Image: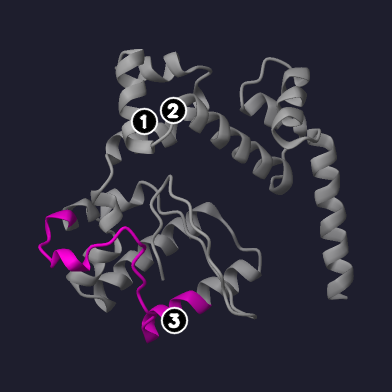
Amino acid sequence: MIFISIGSRCLISTTEGASAICLKPGLILNLYNYSNYSQFSYPKELSSNKPVILSFTPIISVYAESLKWFLNMNFRDALYICIKIRELFYLMSICYTLQERSLFFQSLASRDNSFSDFIYQNYREVKSISELASLSCYSRSGFEKRFRKIFGVPASHWITLRKAADIYHEIRRSRKSIKQICFDYRFSSMSHFYKFCKSKFGLSPGYIRKQTLIEKDDIKKVKK
């Protein structure tokens, strides 16, 4: 079990036949006050920029198997997932020591969580960097400086890439119409949305969705 903080990138390889479950705890973390773990004193040599791996205990294994079963049954209700995430945090408090949990969540202490949380909550709601800076009560220059310090890249670059990734995921995975996705991401017109997709993916949104449907049909044929 590993924890990847928001804004991070990683490549995970698994053995053949293994299953991976990705949970996004988001602001639920705040309910458990994991930021206080940064005050826990542990040897500096144990600290690392690499994700800390927690081995499954019997209790966590049972939890994971039950969650996997429900997900395989396409039971993906948002409230259910939220409850299961809270359950996981509770089980972790039983199965692992304070030091183990502190190391596991150590990446939270190395970022400005309030600022990064604000960005993740609001970047889709604005049309410009200036609007996002104003919403965060920063001057444009002050916002750009703090953003680069925390995320390591210019705000415009990060938001454009993030927006593109979100849109691509929506087109491929959601049941929303192309028009609804265009509206949700505040494009001024369908033609503007079409040009955005062509420039970022090299394909039109309609073609991306068509290819996704073809891939799903091929997978079903293979399973049969």
Dot 3 falls on a residue whose secondary structure is helix
| Labelled pair 2, 3 in contact (Cβ < 8 Å) | no
Q: Which residue extends farthest front?
A: 45
Q: Which residue is mark 2?
A: 154
Q: Position of residue 154 (x, y in %)?
A: 44, 28
Measure the C-alpha gap from mark 3 to mark 1.
39 Å
- Mark count: 3
Residue 92, quarter of picture = bottom left
Residue 90, quarter of picture = bottom left
| Labelled pair 2, 1 in contact (Cβ < 8 Å) | yes
Residue 57, quarter of picture = bottom left
In which quadrant of the rendered image does the N terminus lie?
Answer: bottom left
Query: Which of the two discs, 2 and 3, sits closer to the camera?
Result: 2
Whichever of labels 3 and 1 marks the residue nearer the N terminus, that label is 3
Q: Which residue is mark 3?
A: 61
Q: Which residue is mark 1?
A: 148
Q: Is residue 7 above or below residue 44?
A: above
Residue range (magenta): 38-65
Whichever of labels 2 and 1 marks the residue nearer the N terminus, that label is 1
